[in-house]
Amino acid sequence: MAKTLIAFYSHAGENYVNGSVRFLNRGNNEVIVDKIKAALPDADVFRIETVKKYKEDYYELIEEAKQEIHAKARPELTAKVADIEQYDTIILGYPSWWGIPPMAVFTFLESYDFAGKKIVPFCSHEGSGLGGSIRQIKMAVPDAVITAGVAIHGAEAAHCDREVKLILSQAQ
């Protein structure tokens, strides 16, 4: 029986939303994952979290993210998926930071063998769309089957039912 894992990185706190910095109690991807999980109740959920916490100030956070990208950093994660082999499909959610996923997502991808598994990427963004993320994910896991992905405007996370349907259709 095919199993699905919803793995995601989400950033609560200060976020850029429709042209200004706002405090979010829950990150956009966490909100989106709740919608996906409601449609796929048998799917397992894994939250990608770093041991070292990012800065709370939004502008300091994006500088830190930019430095990690340039250093090709692989931040240590707080947990691992116990049995990745049981999953055929991984729905992978992340914010678009500088047009690619946060480096923690690459730590996650490079920690497992995804050969032959389907990865369905989705990102929240405030204007960059998927950016270069699909190409970067393909480079990180070349033996996986990567779908086209879905970009969701972060400010619309609470109302992204159409985009969730696209994610689900790519996961089939």
Image: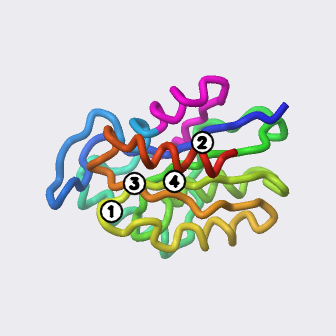
Which sits earlier in the primary sequence, circle 3 or circle 1? 1
Question: Looking at the picture, which amino acid does disc 2 mark?
Answer: Ala
Residue pointed to by mark 2: 7
Q: Residue at x 24, y 55 (%)?
A: 16
Foreground mark, 1 or 2, reads: 2
First-in-chain label (3 vs 4): 4
The residue where tag 1 is placed is 62
Q: CA–CA distance between discs 2 and 3?
A: 16 Å
Does any portion of residue 50 appear in the rendered image? no
Q: Residues within 10 Å of mark 1 (few under 14, many from 20)?
A: some
Mark toward the start of the polypeptide (4 vs 1) = 1
State which tag comes first along the sequence, 1 or 2.
2
CA gap, disc 1 and disc 2:
22 Å
The one nearer the camera, 137 or 42, is 42
Above or below, 67 relative to 61? below
Q: In the picture provided, is 125 more to the left or to the right than 166?
A: left
Instruction: Give x and y (percent) for residue 151.
Output: 44, 59
Q: CA distance from mark 3 to mark 1?
A: 19 Å
- The span from disc 3 to disc 4 (Cα, nearest Å) is 7 Å
Question: Image quadrant for the C terminus?
Answer: top right
Q: Residue at x 68, y 55 (%)?
A: 109
| Colouring scheme, one of rainbow, by chain, secondary structure, one colour | rainbow
Span colored in magenta: 33-52
Three-letter code, disc 3: Ile
Query: Are the two marked residues, 3 and 4, in contact with CB atoms closer than 8 angstroms?
Result: yes
Is the N terminus in the top left, top right, bottom left or bottom right quadrant? Answer: top right
- If you read the primary sequence from the N terminus, does the residue marked by circle 4 or circle 2 appear first? 2
Q: Is residue 42 above or below residue 140?
A: above
Pointer 4 residue: 122
How packed mark 2 is, by other alpha carbons closer than 10 Å (few <14, some 14-19, many 20 or more), is many
* 96 lies left or right of 168: left
Question: What label sits on residue 152 in the rendered view?
Answer: 3
